[in-house]
Image: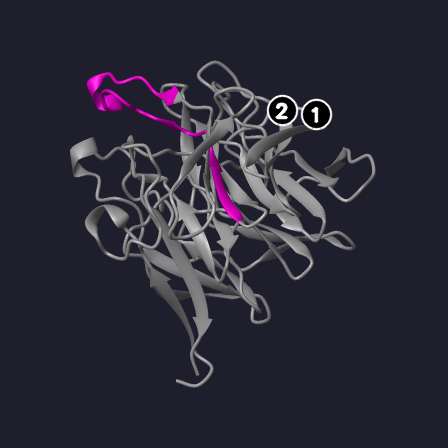
Amino acid sequence: MKGAWVALITVLLASDGQGADFPPLPDSEGFAGPFAGVSNGALVVAGGANFPDKKPWDGGRKVWYDGVFVLEKPDGKWQLAGKLPRPLGYGVSVTHGTGVVCVGGSDAERHYPDAFRLEWKGGKLVTTELPALPKPFANGSGAMVGETFYVAGGQEKPDATSTATAVYRIDLSATRPKWESVEACPGGGRMLAVAAGFDGAFWLVSGVDLVAGKDGRAERKYLKDAYRYDPASGWKPIADLPRPAAAAPSPAPTDSSGFFILGGDDGTQVGAAPDQHRGFSKTVLRYDAKADRWAEAGELAAPRVTVPSVAWGKSWVIPSGEVRPGVRSPDVSTFTPAKKE
């Protein structure tokens, strides 16, 4: 149908021979919560966490990593380029200029406010410290709007029983960049939301809030609300999603008139036994900014959550991520939105 939008999704799984243009990450488990972006034309993936020995339901211990991997071209080989300042995962990362800007994150003990830039330059990894956030930050979301990097929500501590409401931004083009507070999203605190930078605005979509359960422990409340922040006019609600999409790849892939939510955790399998979990939603949702409307736009062959998405070449790359709770994949997938007349 003329004018209809179709999401063309290619999943490149080098491990099973279905299109080996993108090799899998050189770790048999893969990672949840890595940092990722593009530096001087190369794909960079750093940090993250997994369960290398036993799965969590068998008493396995989560391990955080500091390795930085670089893929200079789609048909090349991953290189271990260097290390992060510390083992770190579950922060936010974006491509900016010739580097990858990484903010926040956690390890087994705490959450961090740190920010730094990774650059692959002349065959070497260069790490540059940036101003730290005012508070520790992990499990939040963020995106670039022009030269300004926005981050929102998340948690300040691993044992937090509520989600953070703080929103910050930093002008990365400034001579002396510094973080400044932005008014809180009217939808309240949230973690594992999807962010997007589109049409000169910052968009914050879905995620989960934490609420007190019957036993006093924090439980997740899955969210469908979504918001647009315009630097000139502030926050405005947009249409609710048809379903929650927590921890979907973020920043969200964009096209000329909207952005996409790639699967995500819809909350329908909370409490499912590990061997009964069916994996996360395969449905792609597309937001049409002009119409303020969500619509289904295809399906993913291999949905992943708790993973960034990165514009590289003509596609958006999803490097690794969670297949289901406690299970990661080293495979690298790509998403290519296209208009079909």
Seen in the picture, residue 167 relative to 238 is either above or below; the reply is above
Please, what secondary structure does the residue beneath circle 2 have?
loop
Q: Nearer the viewer, residue 239 or 275?
A: 275
For residue 131, side relative to residue 174 (left or right): left
Seen in the picture, residue 238 relative to 305 is either above or below; the reply is below
Q: Report if the CB atoms under discs 1 and 2 are less than 8 Å apart.
A: yes
Is residue 45 located in the magenta-colored stretch of the structure?
yes
Q: Nearer the viewer, residue 147 or 117?
A: 117
Magenta-highlighted residues: 42-63
Q: Is residue 245 visible?
A: no
Please state the horizontal and vertical placement of residue 170, each as a whole percent of the image. 73, 39
Which residue is denoted by mark 1 in the rendering? Answer: 134
Which corner quadrant holds the C terminus? Answer: bottom left
Q: Nearer the viewer, residue 136 or 340?
A: 340
For residue 69, side relative to residue 38 (left or right): left
Which corner quadrant holds the N terminus? Answer: bottom left
In the rendered structure, which amino acid carries the disc numbered 1? Pro
Please, what secondary structure does the residue beneath circle 1 have?
loop
**Structural crowding at the residue carrying mark 2, measured as other residues with C-alpha within 10 Å and reported as few (<14), some (14–19) or many (≥20):** some
Q: Nearer the viewer, residue 159 or 35?
A: 35
Which residue is denoted by mark 2 in the rendering? Answer: 113
Tell me the distance, in whole angstroms, between the alpha carbons under discs 1 and 2: 7 Å
Please state the horizontal and vertical placement of residue 284, each as a whole percent of the image. 38, 59
